[in-house]
C-alpha cells in the first residue's frame, strides 16, 4: 500500500491514443500510453482504473510494453496484471495494476499498450424492434481517458461498423468521418476527468451470445481427440416484436431481417474430421465445410434465422488427430489445445471446458494463462471400470481473446490402452469356454448313485404293490359277487344263473391270478420288496384258500339247491366253511391294510 | 479334415455340420434383417420417424429418466390440455419397456448410448428376432429347409420393412416378433404336448399383449384353430395342453397390463377364447366319459346331456346377447368392429376412417408389400395340405384370416406378411427340394448310387453305404482322395435326404411300410433334368427379383423418416427440414407452458420435439376434443379465436404444402376436420365447404370455405410469393387472395412455408380491431357472421 500511495505522488506525463472498436458486439478498447515519470521516485507499477459499469463487463485485459531499441520495434512483453484496491481513491472505480518489467526511474519513458475487451457494453436502443427495423445500439464512455495521472495529450477514436449514426455527443474537436468518430486531441487533462459521451448507431452484426457453452475434449490414445461443444445461443440484440413474416424475410432479406443473423463460422483446426452439427432433435442440414492445410472452416446455420431475443441450442463435434495436440516430455504427456470456442464474434457468458483423460491417467496438472475455476470429476464411458478423470475448467465472460492454448499434464501408462480390448477378449473367451464346458460336461444330478437307483426301484416296487392291491381288491370284489349270486339263488332259485356267475368268476379269477403271477415274479426279483414279500406271499396264500373255500361253499350250496337236499346237512357244512371264510376274509383284510401302510 | 477321425460316424458329423451351417445361415439372416433396415440411417440420419414413434420415444425418455414406478403412474399434463392423459394406464408398455431395458443394460455396461439411438435401432434388432422366430415356427410346420427359406423371406419382406426401418420405433416393430414367437410356442406345444412350452407360450402372449393391441388376433386365431381341430376330430391331450394354460395364464397375465386390465375378460374380442375354452373342456369330458362308459351307455348319455345342455345354452346365449346388445358398441371396440364390418368406420367413426393406414388396401399395394410372395402363397397352401398336420392347418388358418384382415385395413398387411413368408418359404423349399432331388438322381455321377439305393431298402441301405464309404476311405490312394471325397459327400447327402424323407413320411404317416418308401414313392417325383434345371433357374430368378424389389423398397420407398423430406433436383439433393425447424423454434422461443393447437396428426411430434403442451394428439381417445379443434379450424376467425382462447391456446400450428407441393398438408386433411367437427357440433356442415359436392379452394369455393380459419392460416400472404397465389398441391390459384388476419398474427413460418405458426392476438388488440372494422364493410360482414355462429358455439 505504501508504494501505491507513493506512486500517487509521482507526476506523470503521458500521451494517450485511444481507439474503441465497436464493429462487433465486443467493445475493444485499444489504448497506447506513452508514460513518463516526472516524479522523483522510481515506480514499478502503473494503475489502470475502470468505472464500475465498465469493469463488470470487462472480459479481457492485457498490457504490453514495447521497448524501442533503435528503429525496429521489438520484444513486446506482456505485463502481469492484478486487481488492486488502493485507499483514498474515488469509489465506484475498479483498479487494476500492471507491474512494469523494470522500475521506471525519474524522467524515464515507456510505451504501454493496453487492450481491454468488454462484453454486453452495447445497449440496444430501442430495446424492442420489429422485423423491418435496423438494430440501433448505444455506447457510453468518457471522452477523456480515466486516469489517476495527469494526461498530457489524448485523442479518442470510435470505430463503427456502418456509417449510419443516429447521434453522438458533440464535444469540441469531435468529428464524424465515415464510420469513425474522432474526439480530440485534448491536452493537459487533470486526473480523474470524466466527460460522458454517448454514441447511438446502427449495428446489425450478429449479437450472438452463448449463455452456456460446454466443451468436452476427450482424449483417446488410439489417435483421436474428440471435441464436442454444446451451445446454448441467444441473439442478445434488440428484442424482436410483432410478426415474423417469412415472406418479407425471403423477399428482402437485408431490409426486412437485417437484425437477424443467419450463420456463424467456426474456425476449426486443420485436419479436423468427422464434423457433425446437430441438436436434440436431430441433424441440422444447413452447414458447409471447407478445409485447407491451415484451417477447417465450418459454416453453420441455425435451423431458423435468429432475431433479437430468439434462442437456439445445438451441438457441434469434430475429431482431431492426436499427434497435433498431445506431446510427451519427461515421461509426462501434455495436451496443448485452445481454450475458447472456435467461433469468432461470440460472447460466452459461461464456458465450461471438460478435458476427459483416458482411464488410468495420474498426476494431473493444468496450466491456463488466465484465472479460472478448476475441479476434477470422474466419467464412466465405454466399458470403464474405474472411470476416466475429467478436468473441469469454468470461466465466465469469455471472448475470442481467450482463445489461447492451455496445457493439461498427466502421466499415462501405454499398457492401460489394452485394458479394454483385453477385457472384451477375455470376456468372450470365458463365455465360449463356459459354453464348451457346459456342452461337454454332464451337470444333471447324478442318476447312477445308489440312493437314486434305490429310489427308482422303490418307486417301481410301490407301483407293483399298488397293482397287486388292485388285483386283490378285484379278487375280493369277485368273491362278493359270488356271495351275491348265492343270495340271489336263495331269493330267485335260478341255479343256472348262479352257475354261470361261478363260471365267470372262475375265469376272471384265473386271469387275475395270471396277472398276480407276473407281479409276484417282479416283486420276488427286486431286492427292495424283500421286507414286504412275506406279507404278500401270505396274502396270496390266504386269498387262494379263501377262494377255494368260497368255491367249495358255492358248489355245495348250488348242489344242495339242485338236489333239494335237506337244509340242515348242507347248512352245517356250509357253516363250518363259512366260519373259515370269514376268518380268512378278516385275515386278508388285515394283510391288505398292512401292505397299504407300507 | 481332422474332424472325421475324431468323430466316429460320418452321418453324425454331417448332422453337426448341417446344424452349424444352418446356424450360420440364421446369423446371416439376422444380419440381413438388421442391415437392410439401415438405409434410413445411411440415407437420412439416425432419427425417430413419423408420428407415433415420437410418442414412444418420449415415453421411453420418461421411463429412463424417472423409472418404472413413475412410469406406471405417469399423468401427462402436456397433452390433451386441459384433460391430460394417463399415459401409464393407456399405453401398451411392451416396446417402451423393451427399449428402456436395453438402454439400461447398455448403460450399466458403461456403453453410453443415448436413448434415441437405442430407440432407433430397436426395430431392426427385433426384425432379426422376428426372422429367427419365423424359422422356428416354419421348422415346426415343415422342417428346417422351409424354415430357413421363410426366415430369409421375412428378413426382407417390404411390408414388414415399412414398419421396422431404423427409426420407426413403433409397437409393431416388436409386436410382430412377439406374434410369430407366440405362434411358434403354440405349435411347439401342440407338437410336443409339453407344459413347459405351454407356460412359455403364455409368457410370450403376455409380451404380445404388452406390445400391441393386435394381440386380439392371437386370442381369436388360436381358439379358431382349436375349434377347427376339435371339429375335424383332431382333439388330443396335446391340444388341451396347448390351449387351456394359454387361456388361463394368458388372460391372467393380460389383465396385469394396465391398458388391458379387465378388458381381458369383459370385451367381446376375448369371448371367443372363453367359449372355446368351455368347448374344449366339454370335449375333454366327453372323451373321458367315452373312455369309461360302454358305447351304448355313452350314446344314451350323449342324448341326455345334449338335450339338457341345449336348453341351458340357449338361455345363457340369450342372456349374453341381451347384455352385449345393451352396450352401445356391442362390446366391441371401434377398430375391431371396423375389421369385421369394413364399412363400419366410414359410417360411424370418422376419426378411424380419416387415418390413411386404416383404409382398405389397393391391389398394387399387395404387389408392393409382398411382391412374389403373393403368388407363392397358394402353392404354400397346397403344400400345407400334403399332409395336413395340426401345425400346417394352423398356418393355413393364419394365412386365410390375415388375408381377410389385410383386405380391410392396409395396416394389417403387416400381420399378413409373416404368414405369406411362411407359406412362400414352404412352397419355395418344397419346389427346390423336388427339383434338386430330381437333378441329383439323374446326374451321371450319382446314378449308380441311386440304383444301389433303390435296390436296397430303408435303413439297411444306409448302413451298407456307410460301410462302403468306410472301406473306400481306407483303401483310397492319395491321388484319388479328392474325387472320392466329393463323391462320398454326395452319397452322404443322399443318405441325409433319404433319412429326412423317411422321417417326414413316418411323421406324416402316409406310407404304410418303410421299405416301400425307398423305391416306389421317389420315382414319380423325379422330373427331367432339363426341366428341373430350367425350373431352378427360373425360381432363382424369381427370388432374385424379390431381393431386388425388397432392397429397392427398403432403400427408396420406406426409408424416408417423413419429418425430413428430400427432393432430387438437377442441382443436387434438396432437403426440406421444415418440421424440425418449426418444432425447434417452438421449443426455444415460446414459453414452456404455452399451449399449441394443431390438427391431431402433429400432436405427438409437438410434445416430443417442441416440448409444448398440445390440445389433441395422435392418441385419439377423446372424439369431442378433436372435434372441438376441428370445429375451430373450420370456423371463421373470430369464432375460432374464441374456441382457442377458451382452451388457453397461445399458438396455432398449421401445415401448408402449397408452396413446395407437399401433398399431405392440412388443407388436404381439412374435410376430415369438418366431418369430425360436424359429427359433434352440428353447426359445422360438410356441404357448406363443398361446391357441388367438390372440395375446392379456388375462386369457385364456397364463402364458408374461404373464410374458415384453416384457409386463412394456410394462405395468409401466400399470394405475395408469386403474385397469383398458385397452390402447387391443388394445382389451382387460390380463391381468396388478399385478406388480413384480425385475431391471429403470424409469428413464424418455416423456410419452405411448410409449417406456419400463428399466435392468438391478445384481447386488447381485438377491441382495437373491432373499432377499425366498423369502418370497412367487408370485415363487418365477417364479424356479424361470426357473431351468429358464436351463438351456436358450444364454448360460450
Image (cartoon, coloured by chain):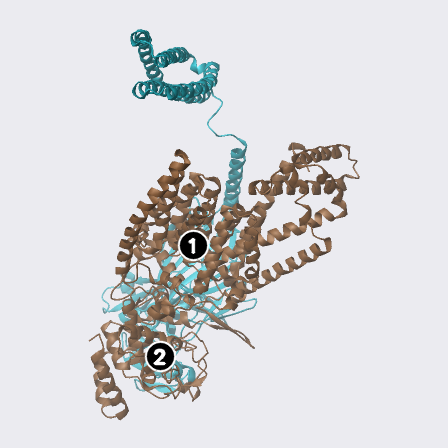
Chain colours: A cyan, B brown
- Asked if one can make out residue A273 in the rendered structure from this viewpoint, the answer is no
Pinpoint the chain carrying mark 2: A
Residue B175 circle label: 1
Quarter that holds the C terminus of chain B: bottom left
Quarter that holds the N terminus of chain B: top right
Marks 2, 1: nearer the viewer: 1
Pinpoint the chain carrying mark 1: B
Name the spot of residue A553 as percent of width and height, x first: 36, 12
Q: Compare residues A355 and B57 and report the one nearer the observer.
A: B57
Residue A154 circle label: 2
Callout 2: few (<14), some (14-19), or many (20+) C-alpha neighbours within 10 Å? many
- Asked if one can make out residue A475 in the rendered structure from this viewpoint, the answer is yes
Left or right placement of residue B594 versus residue A345 in this view: left
Name the spot of residue A532 as percent of width and height, x first: 40, 13
Residue A114 circle label: none
Name the spot of residue B35 as percent of width and height, x first: 53, 57
Residue B321, above or below A560: below
Residue A473, above or below A346: above
- Tell me the SS state at disc 1: helix
Left or right placement of residue B46 versus residue B147 in this view: left
For marks 2 and 1, give the CA distance: 80 Å
Q: Compare residues B392 and A376 and report the one nearer the observer.
A: B392
Callout 1: few (<14), some (14-19), or many (20+) C-alpha neighbours within 10 Å? many
Q: Compare residues B481 and B434 and report the one nearer the observer.
A: B434
Left or right placement of residue A168 versus residue B490 in this view: left
Image point (40%, 49%), residue name: B205
The quadrant where residue A508 appears: top left
Residues marked 2 and 1 touching at CB (< 8 Å) = no
Image point (39%, 34%), residue name: B293
The quadrant where residue B116 appears: bottom left
Name the spot of residue B588 as percent of width and height, x first: 34, 69
- Tell me the SS state at disc 2: strand
Amino acid at each position: 500500500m505504501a508504494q501505491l500511495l507513493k506512486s500517487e505522488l509521482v507526476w506523470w506525463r503521458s500521451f494517450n491514443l485511444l481507439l474503441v472498436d465497436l464493429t462487433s458486439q465486443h467493445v475493444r478498447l485499444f489504448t497506447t500510453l506513452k508514460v513518463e515519470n516526472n516524479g522523483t521516485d522510481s515506480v514499478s507499477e502503473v494503475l489502470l482504473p475502470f468505472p464500475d459499469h465498465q469493469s463488470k463487463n470487462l472480459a479481457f485485459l492485457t498490457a504490453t510494453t514495447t521497448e524501442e531499441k533503435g528503429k525496429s520495434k521489438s520484444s513486446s512483453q506482456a505485463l502481469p496484471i492484478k486487481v488492486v484496491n488502493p485507499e483514498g481513491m474515488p469509489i465506484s472505480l475498479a483498479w487494476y495494476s500492471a507491474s512494469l518489467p523494470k522500475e521506471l526511474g525519474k524522467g524515464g519513458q515507456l510505451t504501454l499498450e493496453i487492450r481491454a475487451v468488454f462484453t454486453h457494453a452495447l445497449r440496444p436502443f430501442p430495446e424492442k424492434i420489429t422485423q423491418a427495423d435496423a438494430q440501433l445500439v448505444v455506447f457510453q464512455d468518457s471522452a477523456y481517458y480515466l486516469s489517476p495521472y495527469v494526461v498530457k495529450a489524448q485523442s479518442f477514436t470510435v470505430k463503427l461498423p456502418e456509417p449510419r449514426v443516429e447521434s453522438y455527443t458533440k464535444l469540441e474537436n469531435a468529428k464524424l468521418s465515415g464510420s469513425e468518430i474522432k474526439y480530440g486531441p485534448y491536452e493537459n487533462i487533470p486526473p480523474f476527468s470524466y466527460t460522458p459521451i454517448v454514441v447511438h448507431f446502427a449495428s446489425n452484426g450478429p449479437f450472438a451470445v452463448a449463455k452456456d457453452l460446454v466443451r468436452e475434449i476427450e482424449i483417446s490414445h488410439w489417435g483421436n481427440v474428440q471435441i464436442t461443444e454444446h451451445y446454448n445461443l441467444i441473439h442478445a440484440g434488440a428484442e424482436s416484436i410483432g410478426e415474423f413474416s417469412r415472406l418479407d424475410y425471403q423477399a428482402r432479406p437485408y431490409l426486412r431481417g437485417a437484425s437477424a443473423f443467419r450463420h456463424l463460422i467456426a474456425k476449426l483446426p486443420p485436419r479436423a474430421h468427422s464434423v457433425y452439427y446437430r441438436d436434440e432433435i436431430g441433424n441440422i442440414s444447413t452447414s458447409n465445410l471447407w478445409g485447407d492445410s491451415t484451417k477447417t472452416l465450418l459454416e453453420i446455420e441455425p435451423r431458423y434465422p435468429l432475431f433479437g431475443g430468439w434462442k437456439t441450442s445445438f451441438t457441434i463435434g469434430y475429431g482431431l488427430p492426436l499427434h497435433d495436440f498431445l506431446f510427451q516430455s519427461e515421461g509426462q504427456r501434455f495436451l496443448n489445445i485452445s481454450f475458447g470456442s472456435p467461433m469468432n464474434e461470440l460472447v460466452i457468458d459461461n464456458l465450461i471446458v471438460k478435458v476427459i483423460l483416458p482411464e488410468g491417467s495420474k498426476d494431473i496438472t493444468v496450466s491456463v494463462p488466465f484465472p479460472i475455476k478448476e475441479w476434477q470429476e470422474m466419467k464412466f464411458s465405454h466399458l470403464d471400470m474405474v472411470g476416466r478423470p475429467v478436468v473441469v475448467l469454468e470461466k465466465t465472460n469469455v471472448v475470442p481473446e481467450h482463445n489461447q492454448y492451455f496445457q493439461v499434464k498427466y502421466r499415462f501408462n501405454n499398457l492401460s490402452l489394452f485394458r479394454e480390448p483385453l477385457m472384451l477378449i477375455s470376456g468372450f473367451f470365458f463365455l465360449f469356454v463356459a459354453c464348451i464346458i457346459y456342452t461337454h460336461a454332464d451337470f444333471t444330478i447324478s442318476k447312477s448313485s445308489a440312493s437314486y437307483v434305490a429310489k427308482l426301484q422303490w418307486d417301481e416296487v410301490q407301483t407293483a404293490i399298488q397293482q397287486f392291491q388292485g388285483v386283490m381288491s378285484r379278487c375280493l370284489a369277485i368273491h362278493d359277487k359270488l356271495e351275491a349270486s348265492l343270495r340271489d339263488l336263495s331269493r330267485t332259485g335260478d341255479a343256472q344263473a348262479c352257475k354261470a356267475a361261478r363260471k365267470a368268476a372262475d375265469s376272471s379269477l384265473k386271469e387275475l391270478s395270471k396277472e398276480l403271477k407276473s407281479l409276484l415274479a417282479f416283486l420276488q426279483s427286486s431286492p427292495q420288496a424283500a421286507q414286504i414279500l412275506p406279507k404278500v406271499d401270505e396274502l396270496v396264500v390266504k386269498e387262494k384258500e379263501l377262494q377255494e373255500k368260497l368255491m367249495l361253499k358255492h358248489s355245495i350250496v348250488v348242489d344242495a339247491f339242485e338236489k333239494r337236499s335237506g337244509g340242515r346237512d348242507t347248512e352245517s357244512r356250509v357253516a363250518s366253511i363259512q366260519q373259515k371264510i370269514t376268518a380268512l376274509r378278516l385275515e386278508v383284510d388285515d394283510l391288505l391294510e398292512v401292505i397299504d401302510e407300507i | 479334415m481332422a474332424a472325421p477321425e475324431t468323430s466316429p460316424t460320418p452321418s453324425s458329423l454331417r448332422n453337426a455340420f448341417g446344424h452349424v451351417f444352418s446356424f450360420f445361415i440364421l446369423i446371416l439372416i439376422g444380419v440381413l434383417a438388421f442391415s437392410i433396415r439401415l438405409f434410413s440411417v445411411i440415407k437420412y440420419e439416425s432419427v425417430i420417424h413419423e408420428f407415433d414413434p415420437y410418442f414412444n420415444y418420449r415415453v421411453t425418455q420418461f421411463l429412463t429418466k424417472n423409472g418404472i414406478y413413475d412410469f406406471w403412474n405417469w399423468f401427462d399434463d402436456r397433452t390433451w390440455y386441459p384433460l391430460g392423459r394417463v399415459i401409464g394406464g393407456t399405453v401398451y408398455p411392451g416396446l417402451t419397456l423393451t427399449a428402456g431395458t436395453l438402454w439400461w443394460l447398455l448403460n450399466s455396461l458403461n456403453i453410453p448410448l443415448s436413448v434415441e439411438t437405442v430407440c432407433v435401432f430397436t426395430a431392426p434388432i427385433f426384425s432379426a428376432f422376428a426372422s429367427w422366430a419365423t424359422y422356428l415356427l416354419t421348422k415346426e410346420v415343415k422342417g428346417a429347409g422351409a424354415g430357413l427359406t421363410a426366415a430369409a423371406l421375412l428378413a426382407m419382406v417390404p411390408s414388414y420393412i415399412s414398419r421396422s426401418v431404423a427409426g420407426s420405433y413403433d409397437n409393431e416393430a416388436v409386436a410382430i416378433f412377439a406374434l410369430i414367437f407366440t405362434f411358434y410356442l403354440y405349435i411347439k406345444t401342440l407338437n410336443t404336448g409339453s407344459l413347459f412350452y405351454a407356460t412359455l407360450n403364455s409368457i410370450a402372449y403376455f409380451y404380445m399383449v404388452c406390445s400391441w393391441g393386435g394381440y386380439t388376433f392371437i386370442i381369436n386365431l388360436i381358439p379358431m384353430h382349436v375349434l377347427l381341430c376339435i371339429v375335424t376330430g383332431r382333439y388330443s391331450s396335446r391340444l388341451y395342453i396347448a390351449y387351456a394354460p394359454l387361456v388361463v395364464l394368458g388372460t391372467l397375465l393380460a389383465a396385469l397390463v394396465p391398458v388391458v386390465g379387465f378388458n381381458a375378460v369383459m370385451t367381446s374380442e376375448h369371448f371367443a377364447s372363453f367359449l372355446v375354452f368351455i368347448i374344449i373342456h366339454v370335449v375333454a369330458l366327453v372323451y373321458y366319459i367315452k373312455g369309461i362308459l360302454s358305447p351304448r351307455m355313452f350314446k344314451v348319455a350323449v342324448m341326455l346331456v345334449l338335450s339338457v345342455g341345449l336348453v341351458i345354452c340357449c338361455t345363457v346365449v340369450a342372456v349374453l346377447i341381451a347384455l352385449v346388445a345393451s352396450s352401445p358398441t356391442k362390446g366391441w371396440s371401434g377398430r375391431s368392429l371396423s375389421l369385421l364390418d369394413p364399412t363400419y368406420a366410414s359410417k360411424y367413426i370418422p376419426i378411424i376412417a380419416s387415418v390413411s393406414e386404416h383404409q382398405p388396401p389397393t391391389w398394387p399395394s399387395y404387389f408392393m408389400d409382398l411382391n412374389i410372395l403373393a403368388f407363392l402363397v397358394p402353392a404354400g397352401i397346397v403344400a400345407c395340405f400334403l399332409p395336413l398336420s395340426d401345425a400346417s392347418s394352423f398356418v393355413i388358418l393364419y394365412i386365410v384370416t390375415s388375408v381377410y384382415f389385410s383386405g380391410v385395413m392396409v395396416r394389417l398387411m403387416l400381420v399378413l406378411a409373416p404368414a405369406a413368408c411362411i407359406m412362400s418359404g414352404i412352397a419355395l423349399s418344397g419346389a427346390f427340394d423336388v427339383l434338386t432331388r430330381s437333378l441329383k438322381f439323374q446326374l451321371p455321377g450319382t446314378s449308380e448310387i441311386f440304383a444301389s439305393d433303390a435296390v436296397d431298402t430303408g435303413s439297411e441301405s444306409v448302413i451298407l453305404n456307410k460301410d462302403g464309404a468306410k472301406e473306400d476311405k481306407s483303401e483310397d490312394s492319395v491321388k484319388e482322395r479328392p474325387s472320392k471325397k466329393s463323391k462320398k459327400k454326395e452319397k452322404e447327402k443322399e443318405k441325409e435326404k433319404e433319412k429326412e424323407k423317411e422321417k417326414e413320411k413316418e411323421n406324416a404317416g402316409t406310407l404304410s411300410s418303410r421299405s416301400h418308401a425307398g423305391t416306389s414313392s421317389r420315382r414319380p417325383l423325379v422330373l427331367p433334368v432339363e426341366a428341373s434345371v430350367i425350373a431352378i433357374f427360373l425360381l432363382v430368378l424369381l427370388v432374385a427379383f424379390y431381393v431386388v424389389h425388397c432392397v429397392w423398397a427398403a432403400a427408396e420407398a420406406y426409408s424416408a423418416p417423413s419429418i425430413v423430406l428430400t427432393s432430387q433436383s438437377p442441382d443436387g439433393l434438396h432437403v426440406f427440414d421444415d418440421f424440425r425447424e418449426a418444432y425447434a423454434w417452438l421449443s426455444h422461443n415460446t414459453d414452456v407452458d404455452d399451449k399449441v393447437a394443431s390438427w391431431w396428426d402433429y400432436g405427438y411430434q409437438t410434445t416430443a420435439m417442441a416440448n409444448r403442451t398440445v390440445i389433441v394428439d395422435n392418441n385419439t381417445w377423446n372424439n369431442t376434443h378433436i372435434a372441438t379443434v376441428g370445429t375451430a379450424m373450420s370456423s371463421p376467425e373470430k369464432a375460432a379465436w374464441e374456441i382457442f382462447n377458451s382452451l388457453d391456446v397461445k399458438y396455432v400450428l398449421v401445415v401448408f404444402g402449397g408452396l413446395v407441393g407437399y401433398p399431405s398438408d392440412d388443407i388436404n386433411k381439412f374435410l376430415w376436420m369438418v366431418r369430425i367437427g360436424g359429427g359433434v357440433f352440428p353447426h359445422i356442415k360438410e356441404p357448406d365447404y363443398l361446391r357441388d359436392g367438390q372440395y375446392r379452394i379456388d375462386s369457385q369455393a364456397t364463402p364458408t370455405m374461404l373464410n374458415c380459419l384453416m384457409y386463412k392460416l394456410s394462405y395468409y400472404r401466400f399470394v405475395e410469393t408469386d403474385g397469383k397465389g398458385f397452390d402447387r398441391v391443388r394445382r389451382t390459384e387460390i380463391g381468396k387472395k388478399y385478406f388480413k388476419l384480425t385475431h391471429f398474427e403470424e409469428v413464424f413460418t418455416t423456410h419452405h412455408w411448410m409449417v406456419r405458426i400463428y399466435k392468438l392476438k391478445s384481447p386488447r388488440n381485438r377491441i382495437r380491431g373491432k373499432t377499425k372494422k366498423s369502418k370497412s364493410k367487408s370485415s363487418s360482414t365477417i364479424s356479424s357472421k361470426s357473431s351468429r355462429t358464436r351463438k351456436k358455439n358450444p364454448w360460450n
